[in-house]
Image (spheres, rainbow, N blue to C red):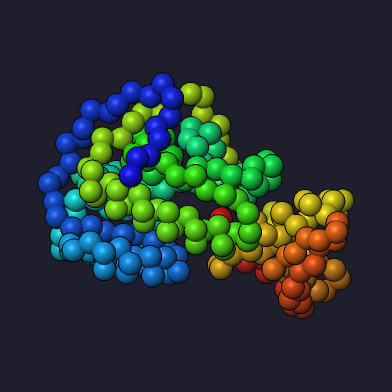
Amino acid sequence: MNFPRLNGERRMAPARFQAGDGYIVASSRMWHYDAYLDLKGSLAADWRWVSTKSGLEDTLSQMRPRYIFFLHWNWYVPSEIYETYECVCFHMTDVPYGRGGSPLQNLILAGHTSTRLTALRMVEQMDAGPVYAQRPLELTGSAQSIYETAVWKSCEVIRWIIDNNPAPTAQSGEATLFERRTPAQSEMAKDADSNRVFDFIRMLDAEDYPHAFIDYGNMRLELTDARLANGKVSACVTISFDEVAGLETGDM
């Protein structure tokens, strides 16, 4: 399986990581667990799943992994970890374009209909590490469906990395930075057209994410499962009361 490289890149000299056996898959999203089980079942090795910061620390006290694969992670990774072990993270842009937070939402807001899922080595600067591989990713459907497609593509790349032990390639070109969105930014604009309303609802429609919402009096209307047809948007609405000040704080 061949993965394209970015134009004009130079190969990175191999880093001197600790030799190790086995693999850690780290994610704070439990719906990634099925993908982990598929990996574990397809490649005979010492596999470990971690979903918390303390779980990662405990696991590293028990083993020396060859790779640590971060599918999604809510916490800062200390330098002593990524400088000791080869840590691979995944980002949903064609880096160096779109480094930073909330890549899916920022891509859709910018009008993109497709992107490249990038596997890169974790370094101190966010999403600035050298690239192992990329895969094309369509940005159609709900955020949940896009994330689920992305995690299975990530697992394909994980298998390829394990099989080929590649040296990653340095990023080239001017970096474009995305800002992490806040839950308050999930409030619907009042002057959007049907296409923008549809995109706004679907880009926030994922498990554990702050859904698109409208505040009306003492009610909050959360919108999911959007459909667009004939210039009209239909969606499921969940109404809560007297909770306007209690915004959810899901990580984006």
Q: Nearer the viewer, residue 222 or 163?
A: 163
Residue 192 lies, in percent from the top left, at 83, 51
Q: Residue at x 17, y 36 (%)?
A: 16
Q: Measured along the vertical axis of the image, is residue 63 above or below residue 96?
A: below
On screen, 15 above or below 232? Answer: above
The residue positioned farthest toward the front in the image shown: 1
Percent across and percent down for residue 137 are: 52, 48
Q: Is residue 49 above or below residue 116?
A: below
In percent of width and height, residue 241 lies at 77, 78
Residue at the far top: name it: 8
The image quadrant of residue 75 is bottom left
Q: Position of residue 98 (x, y in %)?
A: 54, 38
Which quarter of the rendering shows the N terminus? top left
Q: Is residue 169 left or right of residue 65?
A: right
Query: Do we see residue 101 in this rendering?
Result: no
Instruction: Name the image quarter holding the C terminus.
Output: bottom right
Residue at the spot x=17%, y=62% of the render? 45
Residue 142 vs 132, above or below: the answer is below
On the question of residue 84 being in view, the answer is yes
Front in this rendered view, residue 5 or 108: 5
Q: How many marks?
A: 0
**Side of 172 where 110 appears, left or right:** right
Residue shown at the point (64%, 42%) measured from the top left: 112
